[in-house]
Image: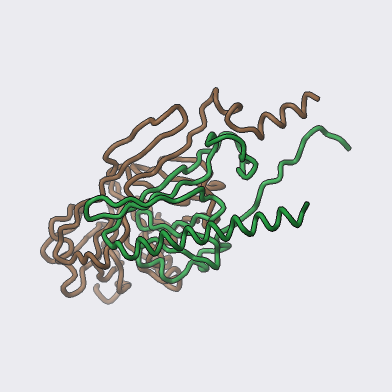
Amino acid sequence: MSDSRVPFSDIYLATEPYVKSVGQVRIGASGIGWKAAEGEAEALQGVNIPGLSMPAGMLALQREDLRRLQWQRVARGYGLRIYTKSGTLHKLDGFTADDYEQLRDAVKRFFSGLTLEVRDISFKGWNWGKTDFEGSDMSFRVENRPMFDLPMAYVSNTNLANKNEVSIEFQPPRTTGKGTKRKGAPDELVEVRFYVPGTIATGAAIPAVRDDDENMSA
Amino acid sequence: GDDGEETRVVKKFESYKRETALPREVRNCKILVDERADSIVLPIYGMAVPFHVSTLKNISRNDEGEYVYLRLNLVSPGQGVGKKDGLPVEDPGNTFVRSLTFRSTDIARMNEIYQSITALKRDQIKRETEKAQLAD
């Protein structure tokens, strides 16, 4: 019954980064759907997202394929992360904070066995933490909370610059869609470098540890 | 009593206490300088990711073809000699983000961001210096 579906408007299909296309999300017993708004499907031309049918610009995720659902703060408001059993992480961004309860209730009502998990993001502004893999995303965590994720699918090159430094280069996907406006284009991340502590070098590289040792032995 | 453990003073700073404090403009997915939070908010794959100015070492700008590249170098272990006291090390096993490079075709805006970040860093260093002088 279409009446029993819960709709959310002005939602971005963010599965593929740098593609700007808004539409409506509907959640019902059959699964989660997203449909591009009038004129918004153009930007998805040539974009490869599993489950997306063109030219209508419709994403259909079947109930049986849903594995895990997460809610988190994103740049464009709040986002729904949908892990499918077929291995894709879909992202729908642009929800408001107020949508949370409605979304959580819809998940509970329609998808028994699944819950809307809250993914708590770190906004401390620190640049030290731990890296961890979640599917094909490398996630940087501060005090065990994710701070940002790097999808390995867009990595063009990695390099061990020296024994403690790893660089990861990204090839931002070519945004050739007609809907791509250069002026409003997002800033693109092209490289991240990490200092990675070595098992041998750690003590020597970080004076705090050495100081403590000296104090302890004194 | 003397337990032999020197409590290391870790400079505590925090960009935002909660997610609702992020400026509204982060939704543009562009680099944003938030002076009020002493932070630079970066768009990283759909997320708005703040870095406190205290983590910034310097910034460089590079023009290449139609793009302007901004590279933010952050404070991390093993850089230069001395001056390591500002490094907040709590766990020697920590990984550090050492640098982030962004590109854009909007030259004027990237220049503006470069200037704002430079000014933000300069003001922070000035404040730190004044604080240190007062403490002496």
Q: Is residue A32 visible?
A: no
Q: Quadrant of the C terminus of chain A?
A: top right
Q: Is residue A87 left or right of residue A140?
A: left
Instruction: Estimate the x, y position of residue A99 in percent, counting from the top left.
Output: 41, 71
Instruction: Estimate the x, y position of residue A6 in percent, counting from the top left.
Output: 32, 72
Q: Residue furthest bottom?
A: A3
Q: Quadrant of residue B108?
A: bottom left
Q: Quadrant of the N terminus of chain A?
A: bottom left
Q: Residue at x 28, y 48 (%)?
A: A88
Q: Residue at x 64, y 59 (%)?
A: B127
Q: Is residue B34 above or below residue B131?
A: below
Instruction: Estimate the x, y position of residue A171 in percent, counting from the top left.
Output: 26, 46
Q: Residue at x 26, y 54 (%)?
A: B67
Q: Quadrant of residue B83?
A: top right
Q: Residue at x 61, y 58 (%)?
A: B126
Q: Which chain is brown?
A: A
Instruction: Estimate the x, y position of residue A130 in percent, counting from the top left.
Output: 50, 41
Q: Which chain is green?
A: B
Q: Nearer the viewer, residue B71 or B13?
A: B71
